[in-house]
Each structure stands twice: as C-alpha cells, then as structure tokens.
Image (tube, rainbow, N blue to C red):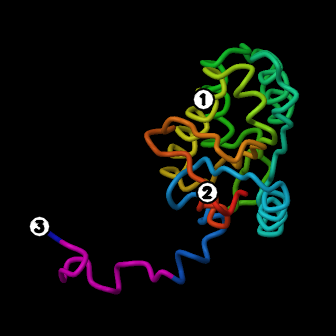
Amino acid sequence: MATEDSPALGPEHRPDRADVDDVPGIEYMDNTFVTLFWRRQLLTDAELRLEERGFRVVRLAAGEWTRERDMHRDVAAALRFPDYYGHNLDALNDCLGDVACHGPYDDSPEGTGLVLSLTDYDRFTAACPEAAQTVLDIAAGQARRAAVLRRRFFCLVHSDDPDIRFEPVGAMPVLWNRDEWADARRR
C-alpha cells in the first residue's frame, strides 16, 4: 500500500504547500465549502480579495428573507436561473448544480470561480431553520461536485450571531474563517 512517504508518491508527485496556498480561494475550500463570518468587514475584505483574483461574487441579503420563497426569488434572480426554475429546494439543487458545475449562467473568467456570499444568514435561519440548513447543504454538495470537475464554487456566510452553529453540510462541517476561529475572536 502506498503512503505519502513511499516511492510511489515521491515529492515530485505531491503538491508543494506553497503551490496549494497559491490556489485562488483555497482558504475557503480547504476544510469546508461553507465558511462563516461574524465581522462584516472580514467578509467584505474576503469578497474584495476574491474579486481581485477573478472570482464572480454574488452577494445576497439573506436577512431580508422571512420565507423560503423570498430566498428562491433572490437566488434565482442573482444567479440568472431559467424561467422554469421551480422555486423549491429540489429545483435549487438542480439549478445551483448547473451554475456551479457546468457554468451556463456563470460569467467568471476561466480558472477562477463563483462565490455565493450570504449576509445576515442568522435571520433567515431564525425564520426558516430547516430551509436555511438545507440551502447550505445544497451549496456544499454542489461545491464538492464542482471541485471534482475542477471548478471553484463555495459559500461565504455572514451571521450577526457569534454563536451560530449548523449541522455538517455536504458531509463536511460549517467552520468559522481563520481570523474568527476561536470563540474569543468573535467577542
């Protein structure tokens, strides 16, 4: 059985950590495809850095969603879903998969990707907890599919609640960003 130190996987076949760190957006895809932010300025800074690297950042004000249909309306408009979009979670999964994995609605330059940035997500979570969890799960699942196809897609989620937690999504945990990882850094 080959191990990292075995000749079958010698140093010439392993990416150098510096090379991996140069991959645009890797800090938001390393351990999860859904990253939480408490400080709005950190989210804004991340969005700007990603845009400078060529990502298309789609910003959505989730705090305005008091019903699931509000989310469907805004996501469909922002991502330019087709007119036949069904405005339900199954349809969201299908159309988000098209956007993330095949890109017919994505205008980001080749080699970068798409970022979905959701602000005040804690309000949507309070209003529609099951839908809010499912939306993140769908995003994470489609992001993983996109990565397999060598496309970049991930989700940045802002919350005014520094203690917000979500169940794992896309079989991965929802984690805080590196600057706010420790609970004390969100106080």
* Mark 3 neighbour class, 10 Å CA radius: few under 14, some 14 to 19, many 20 or more: few
Label placed on residue 149: none
Per the rendered image, the range of residues in magenta is 3-17
Q: Residue at x 75, y 17 (%)?
A: 68
Magenta stretch encompasses residue 46: no
Task: Read off the residue under disc 1.
Answer: 133
Q: Secondary structure at mark 2?
A: helix
Residue sitting at 80 percent across and 53 percent down?
56
2 and 1 marks in contact (CB < 8 Å): no
Q: Give the secondary structure at mark 3.
A: loop
- The mark lying in front, picked from 3 and 1, is 1
Closest to the observer, 9 or 130: 130
Q: Amino acid at mark 1?
A: Gln
Is the Cβ of the residue at disc 3 closer than 8 Å to that at disc 1?
Answer: no
As measured in the structure, the alpha-carbon distance from the residue carrying label 3 to the one carrying label 1 is: 39 Å
Of label 3 and label 1, which has the lower sequence position?
Answer: 3
Q: Is residue 7 magenta?
A: yes
Which of these two is toward me, 102 or 31?
A: 31
Q: Are marks 2 and 3 in contact (CB under 8 Å)?
A: no
SS for callout 1? helix
Residue labelled with disc 2? 183
Q: Is residue 2 above or below residue 129?
A: below
Residue type beneath disc 3: Met
Where does label 3 land, which residue? 1
